[in-house]
Image (cartoon, grey):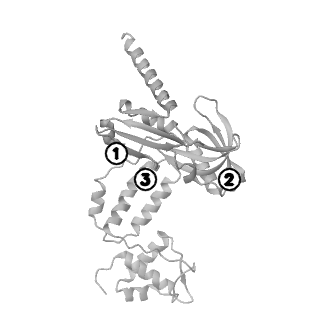
Amino acid sequence: MAKYKPQHARLLFIDRKLREKRYPNRQSLAEEWETSYKTIQRDLDYMRYELDAPIEYSARYRGYYYTEEQYQLPAMHLRERDLFAIYLAEKLLTQYEGTPIYNSLCSVFRKIEDSLPDKAPACLHNDQQLFTVLPPFTTVISPEVLATVFDCLRTSTRLDIEYHSPNSKPMWRRVDPYQGVRFEGDWYVVGHCHVRQAIRTFSLARIQAAKKGTERFTRPAAFNFEQLFGSHFGIHRGEEEIEVCIHFNRHAAAYIRERQWHPTQRISEQDDGSLFLTLCVNHLSGLRRWLLSWGDGAKVLSPPALADDIRQTALRMAGVAEEKQSVPHK
């Protein structure tokens, strides 16, 4: 056999011998692989305690075997670009810090890295330092609330929440949680609200307390998150499809062209470098905030109600700015 024998290949060899049910022992494995008795012992310990492989020793047959009939060590044949993707994906985990799944995800990545070949290019670790992931601004969510909501989602259990909507008093809601959603630094739960008797979206940051109920529910077969939120612009949704047309001046148009802002978008280029963006949405709240972020670079052409709303908001903002300028400095 070749002199260079990576650990991962050796583990796969041991795995194959165990699945053949011939009860190999350390000596026979070491002789066949042409390695030391101690190396095989370390490999067996690693498979047992780090990879959770169900390996036991049979005194009767004087060899090792799998206690689970269908167990097989996962085989990973990775190219350099695959390894780099793994290292980069680990950096993306930062946006999930503070959630119940963060530690579990980190544990999974540790196991993946531990199962990689011994000779994985060291330069990939250095390349990893060349990339930085800047997570979005995140909301403050109670760890207890997050854990309770995730638990009810996974177990299809009814959930009681004390919810504080903006500009209203907190009230208790009973919810059948259907879908968890991560969007722009916040976690949301979408489900059937027993108070409103309709599907609603709740921000976990606005849940002041959460209690796991005792009743189970069945998620409706007709519930389809992709269909329900297919034309959304943001996390909110409505019942009616609204066609919106916006004119972006030449400066703003350069940025609009760079991204796919919405699945339904259509762009009409103009001779002066500006463009018209047309899209269909089922809720205007998120789109309204997005439009305001463009300042005078965007002008709503339709629907008229949205155009008037943006205009009035801009006038109020200008009025606030004028008031601040007129206040004498002490």
Q: Quadrant of residue 84?
A: bottom left
Query: Vertical placement of 129 versus 116: above or below?
Result: above
Q: Position of residue 298 (x, y in %)?
A: 38, 33
First in sequence: mark 2 vs mark 1:
2
Name the foreground residue: 315 vs 40. Answer: 315
Q: Residue at x 37, y 69 (%)?
A: 116
Q: Position of residue 291 (x, y in %)?
A: 43, 35
From mark 1 to mark 3, how far is it between C-alphas?
Answer: 29 Å
Q: Which residue is mark 1?
A: 257
Which quadrant of the rendered structure holds the C terminus?
top left
Residue type marked 3: Leu
Residue type marked 1: Arg
Q: Which label lies toward us, 2 or 1?
A: 1
Q: Residue at x 49, y 73 (%)?
A: 48
Q: Position of residue 86 (x, y in %)?
A: 38, 62
From mark 3 to mark 2, how far is it between C-alphas?
Answer: 28 Å
Name the foreground residue: 14 vs 290. Answer: 290
Q: Which residue is mark 3?
A: 93
Residue type marked 2: Thr
Q: Secondary structure at mark 3?
A: helix
Q: Which residue is mark 2?
A: 157
- Whether tag 1 and tag 3 are in contact, CB under 8 A, the answer is no
Q: Residue at x 41, y 46 (%)?
A: 266
Which quadrant of the rendered structure holds the N terminus?
bottom left
Query: Vertical placement of 325 versus 104: above or below?
Result: above
Number of numbered discs on residues: 3
First in sequence: mark 3 vs mark 2:
3
Q: Secondary structure at mark 2?
A: strand
